[in-house]
Image: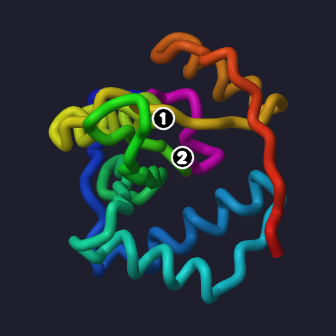
């Protein structure tokens, strides 16, 4: 990344919908999932709703939207304050390895601190080895294994 390619990370706003949706679809392609349009619409609505504990930010390089991050504040039985779950992180293929993922995560760290959270946590697939190289530098592995039961 050159000095001319300054990274900017800022909160998502209504006018960002098109850029967000394109990156959101890229995220889904990366993880080989297809989130229904209705769910994506609700996610967008929640991000923009100040009454929701769901937040999002856009990563830009030279005003081009190249990354997104979503996070959710939630209660914990282990602390009085909230935790912050970094739920989704995506950087466009041609922009990976330039520090944008780190900047997006640091944006969440800052937002979580300002919200009084004591922890930011997230999951990644075991096969996401490139991302894990970054994650291992900026966070600690918890040692926990996730179990899941789909209730549909």
Q: Are marks 1 and 2 in contact (CB under 8 Å)?
A: yes
Q: In screen coordinates, is 13 left or right of 36?
A: left
Q: In screen coordinates, is 125 left or right of 26?
A: right
Within 10 angstroms of label 2, few (less than 14), some, or many (20 or more) residues?
many
Label located before the other in sequence (1 or 2)? 2
Work out how far the residue at label 1 is from the one at label 2, CA to CA, in angstroms.
7 Å
- Residue 115 lies in what quarter of the image? top left
For the N terminus, the image quarter is top left
Q: Residue 24 at what x, y percent from top left?
A: 58, 65
Q: Residue 100 at what x, y percent from top left?
A: 44, 36
Q: Residue 25, relative to residue 80: is it above or below?
A: below
Q: Residue at x 80, y 49 (%)?
A: 148
Q: In screen coordinates, is 27 left or right of 139?
A: right
Residue bounds of the magenta highlight? 88-99
- Residue 70 lies in what quarter of the image? bottom left
Q: Residue 133, relative to residue 44: is it above or below?
A: above
Along the line of sight, which residue is nearer the eye, 11 or 54?
54
Q: Residue 45, relative to residue 61: is it above or below?
A: below
Q: Indicate which disc residue 89 carries.
A: 2
For the C terminus, the image quarter is bottom right
Q: Residue 20 at what x, y percent from top left?
A: 46, 69
Q: Is residue 5 magenta?
A: no
Secondary structure found at label 2: strand
In the image as oriented, which residue stretches furthest toward the bottom? Answer: 38
Q: Is residue 91 magenta?
A: yes
């Amino acid at each position: 990344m050159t000095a001319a390619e300054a990274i900017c990370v800022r909160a998502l706003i209504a006018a960002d919908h098109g850029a967000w949706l394109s990156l959101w679809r890229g995220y889904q392609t990366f993880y080989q999932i297809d989130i229904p349009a209705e769910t994506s619409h609700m996610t967008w609505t929640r991000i923009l709703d100040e009454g929701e504990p769901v937040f999002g930010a856009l990563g830009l390089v030279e005003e081009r939207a190249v990354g997104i991050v979503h996070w959710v504040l939630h209660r914990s039985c282990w602390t009085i304050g909230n935790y912050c779950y970094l739920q989704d992180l995506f950087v466009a293929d041609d922009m990976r390895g330039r520090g944008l993922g780190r900047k997006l995560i640091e944006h969440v760290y800052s937002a979580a601190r300002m919200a009084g959270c004591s922890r930011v946590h997230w999951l990644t697939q075991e096969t996401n080895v490139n991302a894990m190289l970054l994650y291992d530098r900026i966070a600690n592995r918890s040692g926990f294994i996730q179990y899941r039961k789909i209730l549909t």
